[in-house]
Image (spheres, grey):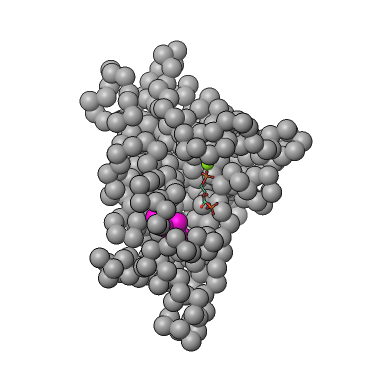
Amino acid sequence: MRRKTLTQFLIEQQRSEQIIGPELRLLVELVARACKSIGHVISKGELGDVLGSLETENIQGEVQKKLDVIANEMFVEANEWGGHLAALASEEMEAIHPVPNRYPKGEYLLLFDPIDGSSNVDVDLSVGTIFSVLRAPDDASGREIGERDFLQPGNQQVAAGYAIYGPQTLLVLTLGQGVFGFTLDREMGSWIMTHPNMRVPKQTNEFAINASNERHWNEPVRRYIDDCLRGETGPRGIDFNMRWTASMVADVHRILVRGGVFLYPADTRHTASGGKLRLLYEANPMAMLIEQAGGSATTGTARILDVEPTKLHQRIGVILGSADEVARIAAYHSLND
Ligand code: AHM
Ligand code: MG
């Protein structure tokens, strides 16, 4: 069987489906190329002198890994010159990065987390790159782009996706009409569609949460996990399995392939911050992918994609995955109100 490449898929989306225009097609092609290069550097590991930490901290107060900084630079350089972007923003950059004047500017805003789950790099577990694409507001043409232009709810995203660097390297993408996965053919250097129309099963008996935070959880989350752990003889009447990779990309990828529910809830430590994960370049793109695949994504009390952002690096509680389980967890939250 002859499989479709990412380029063919994008041309089809542009030509017959008219889902994207040439600028968005170029944008996705350049993002994919950047991810290919980042995956290559990651795979060199110790041989490429890219492992370990730097002495710097990012805006989140987290120690930066060498690879966080390298991948951030690679992503910016690969994307800023194409003429389709107005500005970029990243987990690893405190302020937004307007496209330099030496390049033409376009209408799109690109947000990204260059290496998500970077604590996993040194121990050779899966990590990924997450990205989200917004349109600059209409009134932005001809003026300097600012942080406020990025503060749009996730339901305004025109595309979102991630690359996962694991046993295989994949790019998983939505343009707002379903979710498609492409495996990197390393010999050919091409992304090949291997996962057409990915769907999250409505039901599941697998959950993902960092159980070491149990003492901080709020009541609805505690009740939900307790129900799951009580297994066949508990209120759910079935046994549940648990997985936690500490790379959101890997946990979400597993859910897109075989179902499940992922929780990084806002807990008692997060009353001021709102949660651990970042809204604009982690929660929103993942929520769009999951919803496009038939799943759901909530903070516990609100649909993630409807949250109005107030800050570029805003954090939020994230519960996403199989629709029936997410609905159950949201119901537990509403009982608690
Ligand atoms: P990062 O973007 O700094 O790597 O942090 C995000 C990661 C997610 O990938 C993962 O779900 C979570 O943080 C893991 O957190 P913890 O170490 O608390 O389990
Ligand atoms: Mg990161």
Q: Is residue 234 left or right of residue 143?
A: right
Q: Which residues are magenta?
A: 262-266
User: Where 240 sits versus 161, above or below?
Assistant: below
Q: Is residue 332 left or right of residue 162?
A: left
Q: Which residue of the protein is positioned furthest toward the left in this rendering?
A: 139
Looking at the image, which residue is at 44% across and 49% down? 276
Q: Which residue of the protein is positioned furthest toward the right in this rendering?
A: 47
Looking at the image, which residue is at 27% across and 70% down? 335
Q: Magenta: predominant secondary structure element?
A: strand
User: Where 322 sits versus 148, above or below?
Assistant: below
Specify the quadrant of the image occupied by residue 151: top left
The foreground one among 36 and 188 is 36
Looking at the image, which residue is at 43% across and 80% down? 236
Specify the quadrant of the image occupied by residue 293: bottom left
Quadrant showing the N terminus: bottom right
User: Where 51 sits versus 226, above or below?
Assistant: above
The stretch drawn in magenta includes residue 119: no
Looking at the image, which residue is at 40% across and 17% down? 104
The stretch drawn in magenta includes residue 265: yes
Q: Is residue 216 visible?
A: yes
Q: Which residue of the protein is positioned furthest toward the bottom in this rendering?
A: 233
Q: How many marks?
A: 0
Q: Is residue 327 visible?
A: no
Q: Position of residue 193 (x, y in %)?
A: 54, 49
Q: Is residue 153 left or right of residue 242?
A: left
Q: Position of residue 187 (x, y in %)?
A: 70, 41
The foreground one among 209 and 281 is 209
Quadrant showing the C terminus: bottom left
Q: Position of residue 146 (x, y in %)?
A: 32, 25
